[in-house]
Every structure is written in C-alpha cells, then in structure tokens.
Amino acid sequence: MAMDIALPRGLTGPDGWRRRAGAVACLLLVLAALAAWASPLEARSGERNPVFRYGGNEFIIRRTVSGGTLYLRAYRAAGDQWEPYARTSLPVASEKARRREVEAWARNRNAPLRHGKPSLVERIYFTGKPLGYSTIDLDNPMNTDLNRFNGRMWP
C-alpha cells in the first residue's frame, strides 16, 4: 500500500533540488553556529579570571577564597589549552600586607621579607598588570589537561 506524501510546493519540479540543497546548507550553517556557541571553551560558571603576561608566557590566575584562605592558581598558556602551572595560598587577612611586601621585593630584591621569597603566582598576581580577562572554564578537562591521561603526565 503506497502512501502519497504531499511535498510543499516549490520543492518539486525542475529547480527543487537546488532549493533542497540550499535548505540543507542553511541547516548545516545553523548547526555549526550552535556548536560554536556551545563550545567547551566557554565558561559555564561565568567567572572572569585575569590574564597576565610574565616572562614571555601568558598566565590565567584563578583567585578563590574558602574558609578565610586565599588560593591563587596559575594556568600557563599551552596552545589552545591552559596547563596548571603553580599555586599558593595565604590567609585572606594578610593579603594586603603580602601585596605590599611582594611589590617592594619586586622593586628592590634586597628588601626584607617577613614571609619568605614570593612565589611565582604571587609575583604575577600582585605585581603584574592584567592584559584582559578570560571566561574560559578552567574546570573543564578539555581546556586544562594538556598531555595528561588519567591524571598522569605522558612519558
């Protein structure tokens, strides 16, 4: 038993194949735009992290506060991905004092330090000028796990 399907007028006839091809091309463009919009590189949390240039590399510094402790984590640009690079933590109450201490140390390497030599993350975060801000999702392993397999570095 054959069933007749009524095609919309204009999709049949001598130019119907052109219109169908155009409709398929438009559909593919819409799907490509949706795929680009839903890219894993975009942050889902909406957090903005500053991007710094230091020593010829670009770094994103992620700042989080939890239970009175400030956590700074640096991610270094490695092509399209960001690799975890360095991290440090300090009490939130001493953030301003540590900033002054690191800035003084950056101006004069012989300046007295009460809390030891500043880490790379502190030097970048406290003395650097942000180039801009990134909304990349640093929790997404596609964005940050360069050359890693199950948490181990490739040999």
Image (cartoon, grey):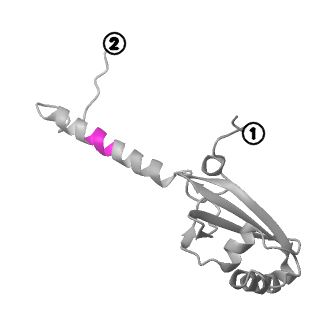
Q: Is residue 51 left or right of residue 94?
A: left
Residue 86's image quarter?
A: bottom right
Q: Residue shown at 55%/54% (left/top)?
A: 41
Tell me the kind of residue under disc 2: Met
Q: Position of residue 99 (x, y in %)?
A: 76, 83
Q: Are marks 1 and 2 in contact (CB under 8 Å)?
A: no
As for residue 17 lying within the magenta part, the answer is no
Name the residue nearer the viewer: 57 or 112. Answer: 112
How packed mark 2 is, by other alpha carbons closer than 10 Å (few <14, some 14-19, many 20 or more), is few
Residue that mark 1 sits on? 152
* Rendered view: 60 above or below 31: below
Which image quadrant: the N terminus?
top left
Q: Position of residue 61 (x, y in %)?
A: 67, 67
Name the residue nearer the viewer: 104 or 53. Answer: 104
Residue 135's image quarter?
A: bottom right
Name the residue nearer the viewer: 121 or 14. Answer: 121
**Disc 1 from disc 2: Cα separation:** 62 Å
Residue that mark 2 sits on? 1
Tell me the kind of residue under disc 1: Arg
How packed mark 1 is, by other alpha carbons closer than 10 Å (few <14, some 14-19, many 20 or more), is few
| Secondary element type, mark 2 | loop
Is the stretch drawn in magenta largely helix, strand or loop? helix
| Secondary element type, mark 1 | strand
Q: Is residue 19 left or right of residue 121?
A: left
Q: Position of residue 74 (x, y in %)?
A: 69, 63
Residue extending furthest left?
14
* Rendered view: 101 above or below 67: below
Q: Which residues are magenta?
A: 23-27
Residue 120's image quarter?
A: bottom right
Q: Residue shown at 54%/73% (left/top)?
A: 132
Instruction: Work out whether mark 1 precedes mark 2 in sequence or the reverse, and give the earlier one.
Output: 2
